[in-house]
Amino acid sequence: MEKSLERYSRQIRFSPIGEKGQLRLSEKSVLIVGIGALGTVLANHLVRAGVGLVRIVDRDYVEMSNLQRQMLFDEKDVNDSLPKAVAAEQKLKLINSDVEIEAIVADVTVETLPDLIEGIDLVLDGTDNFRTRFLLNDVCFKNGIPFAYGGAVSARGMSALFIPGKTPCLRCFISQGEGTGQTCDTIGVISPVVDIVASYQVIEVLKYLVGDEAALRGTLRSFDVWRNHQFDLKMDSSKDGCPTCQLKEYPALVEEEDHVTTLCGRETVQIQRSEKTDLKLWAKKLEKVAAVHNTPFLLRVQLDEGERLVLFPDGRVLVQGTEDIARAKSLYSKYIGG
C-alpha cells in the first residue's frame, strides 16, 4: 500500500481526488476503443493515474507515419509490424504494474461490442471515424455506460462526456452522415491538438470516476489551436426526437453496416457505402495525398501504402491489394472516413 501511495502521492495531494478518490480509481474499469493518436494518450494518462482495469482494442498495426503523434509507439514497433494494441500493452505494463491491462486485437462491431463492454464502467473514444463513434454512443446509452467522446483533425478538436440519463448523446449534436470525409490522412493533424483533446477527455473521466460529478464541464467543447478559437456548447437538453437518448431506438445497433465482401481470387475487398459518391468531389479531396485517376465511371486512387482504392458513383469502394478485411476497413477509414 505504501508503494502505491508513493506512486500516486502527487495525485492524492490534489484534494478533489485524495486517498478516497484514488481508491475509487483503482476499483474502476474503462474501455479505450482505438489505440492510435488519441487512444495512446488516453491510455497513458489513465494507466499512470491508477485506474484498476484498462481494456484497449484496436484492429490496426503500427506504421511509420504513426510515430509523429502516437506516443506509445517507436521505430522497433514499426519494424516488428506489431498490432497497436499489443505494442501499447507492452509499453503500458512497463509504466504501471498495479494496473490490469487487457489488449485486444479486433474490429469493433455490433457483434464484438457486447464482450468488449462487459464489466466496464466507462468507454473512451480513441477512434478516427464517426461510424464507430455512433456505434459506441448507441451501445453506451443502451447499457447505461458513460461515453467520453473525442475527435482531432488538422488543428481542430472536440470533446464531451455523455452520461446516459443525465446528458444528451452524441446524436443530439452531430447527425449521422454529417461527416466531412476529412481525416488525418487527407488533411493532416498536428500532435499538440491530439494531446489537448485526449487530456480534456481524461479530465472529465477522472472527475466522473472519483465521484466529483458536480465538477463536470457539461459542454461539448470545440476548438482550433492554430487559429485560437474555442467554443462550448451546453449539454442541457436532448434534441427533439433523438433516436438514441429519447426514442431509445439505437439505430447504429440495428442498421446494417456498409456491406463488406472479399472478392475471391482478386485480392480485393469491396465495401458498399450507404450513400452515393461524388467522384469529382472525392478526386479533389484525395489528390493531395495520393495519385488519382478520374473517369466519368470511377475514381482510382493509388495509396502510398501500396494498396489502391477504386470508388464508384453508386457508393462501392474497392480496396485492391489485400484480402484482409481489417486492413481494408482501416484504409477505408483513413482515406474515406465514416
Image: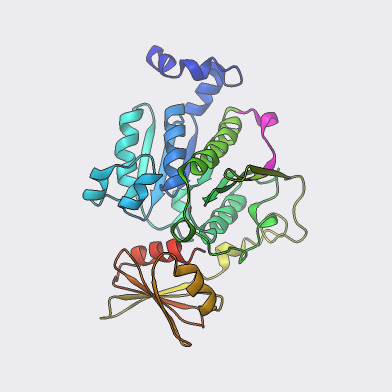
For the point 22% across and 49% down, the residue is 79
Specify the quadrant that holds the N terminus.
Answer: top left
Residue 30: say if magenta. Answer: no
Residue 217: say if magenta. Answer: yes
Corner quadrant of residue 112:
bottom left
In the image, residue 8 lies at what x, y percent?
Answer: 45, 19
Q: Residue furthest bottom?
A: 296
Image color mode:
rainbow
For the point 35% across and 44% down, the residue is 103
Magenta region: 211-220
Total numbered labels: 0
Corner quadrant of residue 18:
top right
For the point 47% across and 67% down, the residue is 336
For the point 77% across and 49% down, the residue is 237
In the image, residue 71 lies at what x, y percent?
Answer: 38, 40
Establish if 196 lies above or below 62: above
In this picture, residue 30 sits left or right of residue 142: left
* Residue 243 showing in the rendered view: yes
Corner quadrant of residue 97:
top left
